[in-house]
């Protein structure tokens, strides 16, 4: 009976997180259909790995880590499958004009570039901003960092503005 209650508690917590997970999936994919697929894959992976979750671990953080890892692995798989090896004489294909889908090379930022920009912030700005992007609500961040909610909102706002300045083409959308 105890194991059945534990299973229902796990599934209940997972169901309660679905909206937060969808928001996080949308920030990662920026596409509703891909976000739905990522949400479904994360939910299934969490259910398959419930035996690896321990009660004293932050459940939301555990699930979001699963989602982030799935997203990164899928991204890497796509990059690997789209890599073209040009074996023509004089690298003919690589020297052809390429349409990347971006108006300019500056329009394409990798996750590494975005993370590098975020990591250049002091912890006062980096930590609340990273938590917010990971799906934590302002109240949760304020409580976790023992800060007034106004300070948290201000730091996230200034971090977003600083990131926008560093990555001029990158646009953020408020979720709250």
Image: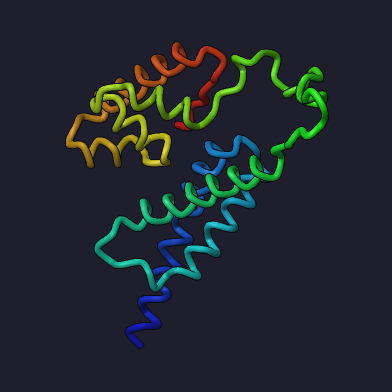
**Which residue does the image show at 51% across and 42% down from the upper left?**
23
Q: Is residue 157 above or below residue 128?
A: above
Residue 103 vs residue 15, the one in the foreground: 103
Q: How is the image coloured?
A: rainbow
Residue 36 vs residue 110, the one in the foreground: 110
Q: Would residue 21 be found to the left or right of residue 105 on screen?
A: left
Q: Is residue 58 above or below residue 79?
A: below
Query: Looking at the picture, how far across and down is residue 67, in whole percent?
Result: 49, 51
Q: Residue furthest front?
A: 89
| Figure quadrant of the C terminus | top left
Q: How many marks?
A: 0
Residue 126 vs residue 77, the one in the foreground: 77
**Which residue does the image show at 53% across and 52% down from the upper left?**
70
Query: Looking at the picture, how far across and down is residue 101, in whole percent?
Result: 73, 23
Query: Looking at the picture, how far across and down is residue 78, in whole percent?
Result: 66, 44
**Which quarter of the picture shows residue 169?**
top right
Query: Looking at the picture, how far across and down is residue 90, in whole percent?
Result: 79, 23
**Which residue does the image show at 54% across and 20% down from the upper left?**
171
**Which residue does the image show at 59% across and 43% down from the upper left?**
75
**Which quarter of the picture shows residue 54?**
bottom left
| Figure quadrant of the N terminus | bottom left
């Amino acid at each position: 009976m105890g194991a059945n209650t534990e299973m229902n508690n796990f599934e209940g917590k997972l169901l309660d997180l679905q909206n937060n997970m969808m928001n996080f999936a949308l920030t990662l994919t920026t596409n509703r259909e891909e976000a739905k697929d990522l949400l479904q894959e994360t939910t299934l992976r969490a259910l398959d790995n419930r035996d690896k979750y321990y009660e004293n671990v932050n459940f939301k953080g555990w699930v979001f880590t699963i989602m982030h890892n799935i997203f990164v692995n899928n991204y890497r798989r796509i990059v690997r499958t789209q890599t073209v090896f040009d074996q023509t004489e004089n690298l003919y294909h690589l020297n052809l004009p390429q349409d990347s889908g971006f108006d300019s090379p500056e329009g394409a930022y990798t996750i590494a570039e975005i993370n590098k920009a975020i990591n250049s912030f002091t912890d006062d700005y980096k930590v609340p901003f990273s938590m917010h992007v990971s799906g934590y609500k302002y109240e949760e961040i304020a409580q976790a960092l023992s800060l007034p909610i106004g300070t948290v909102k201000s730091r996230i706002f200034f971090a977003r503005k600083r990131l926008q300045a560093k990555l001029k083409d990158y646009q953020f959308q408020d979720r709250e």
